[in-house]
Amino acid sequence: MADIFTRMGNLDRRIIFILIALAVIIPILTDLIIPNIVGAEPSRDLFEFVDALPPGSNVILSFDYDPSTMPELQPMAEAVVRHLFLKDHRIIGMALWPQGAALGQDAMSSLSDSLGKEQYLDWVNLGYKTGGGVMIVRLGTSMRAIFPTDRDNVPWSEIPMLQGINSLDDIQLVISLSAGDPGIIAWVMMAGDRYDIPIGGGCTAVSAPQLYTYLQTEQMVGLLGGLKGAADYETLVGIENGEAIRGMSPQSVAHIAIMLFIIIGNIAYFTQKRKGGAR
Amino acid sequence: MRLIIPLAITFTSGMIMILNFFIPHQPFALLGENLQEWYMIVASGAIFLGSANLLHVHFRKTRLKLKNWKYSPVTIVGFLVMIVLGLIYGVTENLPFDYLFMNMVAPMGATMFSLLAFFVASAAFRAFRASNWRATLLLTSAFLVMLGQVPIGAMIWDKIPLAKVWLMAIPNTAGQRAVMIGAAMGVVATSLRMIFGIERSYLGGAD
Amino acid sequence: MNRLPAVILLLLMLTAGAAMSQSGGPPPGDEVRSAALEQRVSGPMELEAVDSPDDAGGAVDINWLMEAEGTVPDSLGVIRTGPSGEEELLAVLPTGTLLYRDTTPLNGTAYSYSIVSYYGGEIAGASGEVQAVPSAQWLYRGRVGMMIILVILTGIILFYIESGKKGRELYIREIAGLAAVDDAVGRATEMGKPVLYIPGIMDMDDIQTIASMVILGRVARKTAEYGSPLLVPTSRSVVMSVAQEVVKEGYIQAGRPDAYNKENINYLTDDQFGYAAGVDGIMVREKPAAIFLLGTFYAESLILAETGRSVGAIQISGTAMPSQIPFFVAACDYTLIGEELFAASAYLSREPKLLGSLKGQDAAKLFFIILIVVGVIAATIGQFWPPLESVAEFLRDLVTVN
Amino acid sequence: MNWEIVGIWLGALVTLCLYSFLYRDNPYYKFAEHLFVGMSAGYWVIYSIFNVLIPNWWDNMLPEGGGFNWIWVIPGLFALFMLARMVPRIAGLSRLALGMIVGTGAGLNMLTFFQSNALAQVKGTIFSVATGGVWSIFSSLVLVVGVVSGLVYFFFSKAHTGFTGKTANVGITILMVAFGASFGYTIMARLSLLIGRCTFLLEDWLPTIPRLLGIGG
């Protein structure tokens, strides 16, 4: 018995390679969906915060990314927009990245059609504006001064849902989907710290560790990190075979495979050590 | 003695870069800007040195029929094809040079990059064994984070994703910061030794 | 006289046409137009113009806000009045712009600026005038703190280097990865296999590459003494030529210039993964007994280290890239973590001036430790006793760079 | 000839050749590796010419509007000095170019590392630890103690004994936890690269095989 473990401890790494390849290929070929389970994590915090807002709340959704990070951030955008629509919140879309405005438009207009929402009543896309943090500070005094018109040049005064909104004080939540700078950090420092507006967000897996510190200090209400964060939100909103959930399947299988290798390695190590000790 | 001029050039260019960072006034602004561009030109121009070496090595291998010499012509042909197509067609999209880059060089790069998926697994299997307390810490924190990355973690205990967040936000940040601040001091000291000519072995022996 | 209404109508049509051609979006509908005629057009307000800070002069920054009430204008114009009193239209900007940088004024001359809003091809509103005089600055304001700290630390490091030169006895702690260099080279010699040295993938301007070249000199001397071949594939042309010089010098110092082989130090490709593929090939074919991975590494770190591991080499790695250290730690026998890479030349050579420099680095770290500890205490107590908060704020400002 | 499908096949073949390395070194890998080194080296030469030498040097020296900016002869001269290494008699000239590259690099590196690796990290660590609940206070303390003790681990001129030794031990402990966490976290990004390649092979390349054989249109 112990001999098996000894041999396993010195497993030819090519066997590991084959198993990793299979762990990735089989889920892709079979379209396997591993049910996602969301624990007590920042993605659930964001979901619950949005869920608890009174219906009709004004939420800024800032699309601060470009096509290169779409695989991680677009599923988040779609899940978040869906949730906001389902809870009858009003979405004020904008972008700190030039190409973000179009990506946001895609997410909002497609879901608006299928969920029976109307542009200018339930959502608006104000478009891209330069300036990053400086621009956000100015939103604190007057949003209209920064965005006299929306992305399609419709004047602010003619957009019904914006009447009664003057500055960030009239906003109940900001969600920034951010691929870097300017993005979540600018929103936290300028809108969160200065004007006390709750900030949530979604980001790529690479930048998540840096932003996790804002959760520890409670400067953010929740965060979606990478593909897992996107899959979490899809699960919580109830999208059963969302893009991110499907993308997570090979990830889950391969992670489990690697963890099993680590466990086998350690069992082998300890059986060997015991044998060595007895000698 | 022959090192004095190179060392003077090192000192001057190093000081220009530093002064340019703190002084916006002319002439430092202009000098700093130009120098950065010049040094890019010099570094790029040097690529011919490497190319000549690459060709030399593989021609020599082929000529002397050294071990694996049969593959050397592949390198030479690959190199020359890219150069010739690049010079004829330029780097414009959808022309032959770009086509070969997009369909061969880029996929090869992506494939080498993706080998990492296999290597993280084999490295984890071999290295993460609880042989001493440091290795145990390495293993435990890696394992917890991996659990937190996939649904199975929350299935075992719903706080495991939180453990991942904490490990990444606190110990990971602390460790990274310590490494970064320490390394920065190493960089500052080494740079100073370069600029002031205290360390000069990189110039080779020339007395 | 009865032709007058027709003329007015014609004028109206012309202005409307001009407005339509000016605005970028869809033309405003009739109802919008008539509403606009009744409603006032919102104009620019709270105009400010200041000399652009921290530059060599020749620039003025202008910023303004728009009135929240009223119809949105079609576009905005920036108007500058020079010393001659002549008005110039500098730029026409789309509505919603709130910043403009004039990069054409002369230093030391006073200019006045104003912003006008256009609606329907006419000037509909204007801000007041503000004045600014562009000038050049001698110091970046936001970088003074950094400069002070840098000067202090430079002084400390140079002081210790000098005192090292004067022959003060200096201690250096054990660094496991460097203590193993001799063993690794010795083992390669015993096995009759080569030593492979990989100096990272960055160019000679990278300090980690420079540190790596200094270590390479030491390793070359050892391989020359022991008589094992030393292979150095590089990813940069300049690094290749420096490596050739450094290794040759090492062989000369070891008294074995005859054993130096230039062909062993060659260039592969500037491409990150092309280089990784080439080095992997060298590893599996030459089967080196010792591999050094010292310098700047990115994702290729583990591709190289795992392949090296698979051919059974002793591996000594070192980098200051925080993201790659974990992979080296997992796959190599010894890893120089961060600053240890820069300490290597002092450790291997025991040259007094280099040891002095290390002591200077330690003093610099102590400086930062004190800064952090004082800052944290001040910020924490400052929560309850405001005067200390300003101390924390001061320290934060000191280390802030703009 | 459908160039798109040819491209997919080229990409797929070199991909498979390189993956064969995972089994062991073999002629297919040797071929792909040598091809990769050669082609990428060629690519970077062309890249340097078209993206640096022409726009940053040539166009500056001989601007479109005519004329000759003599100052831009200097970098050209230095680049030639670097290439002088190929001629043994004047190889020493390359030291001049090297001096410039190293000096500029040292100056730039020193400032950027000092600014973003040292000062910015110190700034991030100056905060009040007494915020939030017990857990938040504990976390903040771990962060500060971790940074400080990690720095102590890097002390070289003081023996790691006594208090320094204990602090350095705490430091290396934190570093190990950090490295483990960072390793575990990065696995996902690495897997997604493999997933990308597998998707290319399975969904872009495989379907072309029946099409080439004339099955299924």
Image: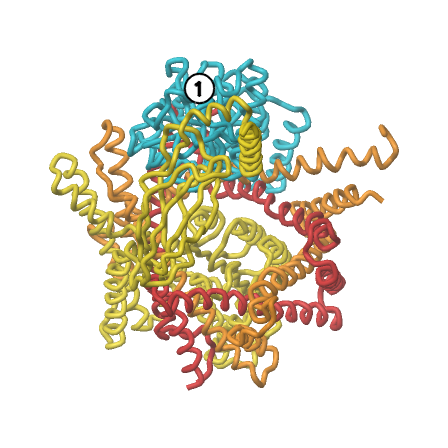
Chain colours: A cyan, B red, C yellow, D orange
Tag 1: Cα neighbours inside 10 Å, few (<14), some, or many (≥20)? Answer: many
Chain letter of mark 1 equals A
SS assignment at label 1: helix
Q: Position of residue A151 (x, y in %)?
A: 51, 31
Q: Position of residue C51 (x, y in %)?
A: 32, 55
Residue D168 in the figure: left or right of residue C229: left
In which quarter of the view is residue C28 placed? top right
Instruction: Name the residue at 58% across, 73% down.
Output: D67
Q: Position of residue C260 (x, y in %)?
A: 56, 76
How many numbered discs sit on the rendered protein?
1
| Residue that numbered label 1 is attached to | A161
Can see residue A257? Answer: no
Instruction: Name the residue at 49% across, 56% down.
Output: C315
Mark 1 residue type: Met
Instruction: Name the residue at 35% across, 41% down.
Output: C127
Can see residue C98? Answer: yes
Please tell me whether residue B21 is drawn above or below residue B64 in the rendered image.
above
Residue A17 in the figure: left or right of residue C326: right
Quick one: quadrant of the C terminus of chain A?
A: top left
Q: Position of residue D189 (x, y in %)?
A: 53, 38
- Farthest-out residue, front: C1
Q: Give B148 or C53, whichever is nearer the viewer.
A: C53
Q: Give C50 or D143, whichever is nearer the viewer.
A: C50
Instruction: Name the residue at 35% across, 34% down.
Output: A188
Quick one: quadrant of the N terminus of chain A?
A: top right
Q: Give C401 or D173, whichever is nearer the viewer.
A: C401
